[in-house]
Each structure stands twice: as C-alpha cells, then as structure tokens.
Image (cartoon, rainbow, N blue to C red):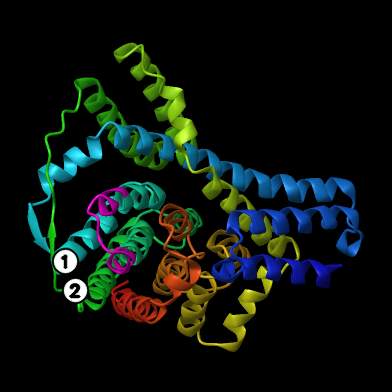
Amino acid sequence: MTTVLLILSFLGFLTIVAEDFTKVDKAKTTLFFGTLVWVLYFIAPPDGLEAPQLMHALNENLLEIATLWLFLMAAMTFVAYVSHKGVIDGIVNRVMPTHMSERRLMLVTGLFAFFFSSMADNITATLVCITVLVSLNLSTDKLLRYIVLVVFAVNSGGAALITGDVTTLMIFLAGKVKIADLFLLSLPALFAVLFLSFLLSRSLKGEVVLVKREIEVAMGDRIIAGLFLATIIGTIGASIAFGIPPVLSFLFGLAVMFMAVHFLNKDEPVLEYIRKIEFDTLLFFLGVLLLVGMLKELQVLEHFPTLYEKLPVVVANYAVGLFSAVLDNVPLTAALLKSGIEMTEGQWLTLTYSVGVGGSLLAIGSAAGVVAMSKIPALSFIAYFRYFGYLLLAYTVGFIGVVAVSYFL
C-alpha cells in the first residue's frame, strides 16, 4: 500500500504539470488524488496503524490546511473589497507616473513586491501586485515576465523577516537565527531580486502608458483601506510581541472590517465579497497540501537529513532549496529541525534563504506561485517553467550572497 500511495501522490503532482495537455483543471485533479490517497490510507493503513493514529495524522494535516485557508480567505476578501472600491487603482494613479519604461516598471515591481512582502505576507503582496499589473494591459508574454518576478520577489522579501514566511518563523523560534541575522539575509535576497529584474527586462524596450482617470474613493472606503494596512501591521506586531498566530490576527481584522463597513455604509452587502474569492485556488491548495501531507506521513521527507551525511552542509542547504520547489517547505523545514542536525548560525541562515526562496523555482513550489497561476490564466506550469534558468541563476546568486554575509556572524 505504501508503494501505491507514493505512485498516486506522484500522479497527483504530475497532473499539475500536464494541465496544458490534459485540459483538466489542476484544482480538480489535485483534489481527486489528494483525497484518494487519504481514503486508501484509512482503508489499508501502512505498518498496521490504529484508527486513533490515523485520525491524529489526518487532523494534524487538516489543521495546517485550515490555517492557510482561513488566512487566504481573510486576505482575499480584504483585497477584493479595496480593489472593487478603486482604492488600489487610486494608489497606482498617485504613485505611478503617466509614462514609464518597461525596464523601470520591472525594477519598481521587484522592489515593491520585496518590501511589501516583508511587511505583509507573500499571498497578499502577490494579489496586490497582480491587480496592479493586470490593470496596465500588458501583452501576455510581458505580463508573465512581471508575474514571475513578483513570485520570486515576494518569497525573497518574506524570507527576510519572521512575519513574512512561515519557515523563517519556524527557524527563528527554534533559536537557530536571530533578527539581526535576518537583516543580513535581506541584503543578498534583495540583490537577487534586482539581478532577476535585470535578466527579465533585457528584451523589454517599450513604454508603459498608465491611463489615469479620476477615481473618487469614498471616505469610508479610505478608512477600510487604512484598516487593511493596520491589520497587516498589527499582525506583525502581535506575532512578535505576543506570539499570536497571523491567521487569528487577520481574521480579527476581517471581522472589524465587516463591522466598520456596516456602520459606515449600512446598505453595503459586505459579506458578498467573500463570494468574489477564487475558490478554485483554495481547492488547489487543499489538494496539493493533502498530497504533501501524505508524503510526510509516509516519511518521505525524513530522508532529506541524510543529505547532510553525504554532502557538505552548504551544498546540502542549496539542494534543500531545490527540493522545496517540489515539496512544501513547511514539513521539509520541520523535518530538518527535528532531525537534530548540527549547523552554525551562518549555515542556518543559508538554509533559511534556501527553503524560503527555493520554492520560487517552480510555479507549484510556493503559495505565491499557486495564487499567481490561479489569477493569471496564461500562467501555466509550463509557461512558468520557461523562466526556470533565470530563476535558478537568481536563486544561486542570492544563495552565494547569503553564504558570504554569513561569515560576519
């Protein structure tokens, strides 16, 4: 049965890659295989596991999935509201010049995605960047270049702070790195984003014309936008000061938003914005995480610490980043933390970068990539994979930079 479950899990991931050929939505196929492996896991448990053990494994995986789902739901609802009210368009009108070269736009996009994801989470940063880029009416080929940069940039920015990426927070809470170390990490991570921006913009020679129009944003909607920003900042502060999970802070911010809209505009059907969420994205997440959870239960992820017995630590850390593009970096990081691997502070810093940014190499390797695929129909797995060489080169440059700065520790 273990072999059967591994084969089915592999087929589940394969259907994502083959979506362009099968024309079957990846949300459907991943959900099918993700639920199938767990059903079979209960019917014929490997190693004679008892029912309580099976339920504990399922509940543990569902808890991780539910946490992500609820966080995404809250963030997407906020974004749907402020986008519908023209707040994001209003910000673009004020900040962006009327004319800008496509190369400069690439640089601005990378910088904004990097710093915004350091303050917020990479999902929200991705959604905001996509909203702005889509409004510019770029050609499909050019839009894909910008989106690829966004995915890499938000993951790079998120890895530099404990509130930006879950794996960074896990390594920090385990006492492996300090806040000051992460500030050192942010420098090569930013350089990698700038380097990728240069690579992707070399063939761009056009101009972007931003058609500005008068957008009247009601005072109440400005208050809600401020509440969104306060929720992001409050989530960071609450996590650092009191250890409050980001999902709880964001759900509270969403609840406050619902109440604020009710009193500011009683005729506004604010709950309707939940229906504007792309639930196919959430279903895709559900399927992928169920498949990864099964690999975790089958102890596939526990074999990765053996890399450190066969390879030098720096090489193993680099390889783990490549693996995180295929497997979820959260259970991968948890397996490494629980394995008892001994590394210096600088080596843990390189691992923090690799598991945080390595997922950018493939579209399915990070939450930002999955969200981008769901929002941009033209961004398939294959379309994203065409930029793998650029992404690998930028990831390598950033990794080398982190190795260099780690010598200061």
Which amino acid type is shown beneath numbered disc 2? Leu
Q: Position of residue 38 (x, y in %)?
A: 78, 54
Q: Quadrant of residue 115?
A: bottom left
Residue 11: x %, y % from top left = 70, 69
Secondary structure of residue under mark 2: loop
Find disc 2 in the rendering and name its residue: 204
Magenta segment includes 133: yes
Looking at the image, residue 99 sits to the left or right of residue 407; the answer is left
In this picture, which residue range is highlighted in magenta? 131-145
Say left or right for 370 vs 32. left
Q: Are marks 1 and 2 in contact (CB under 8 Å)?
A: yes
Q: Amino acid at mark 1?
A: Glu
- The spot of residue 104 in percent (x, y) is 13, 65
Q: What quarter of the picture does the C terminus occupy? A: bottom left
The residue under the point 39% across, 42% down is: 240
Image coordinates of residue 7 in percent, x first then y, are 76, 72
Residue at image position (60%, 54%) is 27
Residue 198 lies left or right of residue 235; in this view the side is left
Q: Quadrant of residue 266?
A: top left
Lateral position of residue 15 relative to residue 264, left or right? right
Q: Nearer the viewer, residue 350 or 18?
A: 18
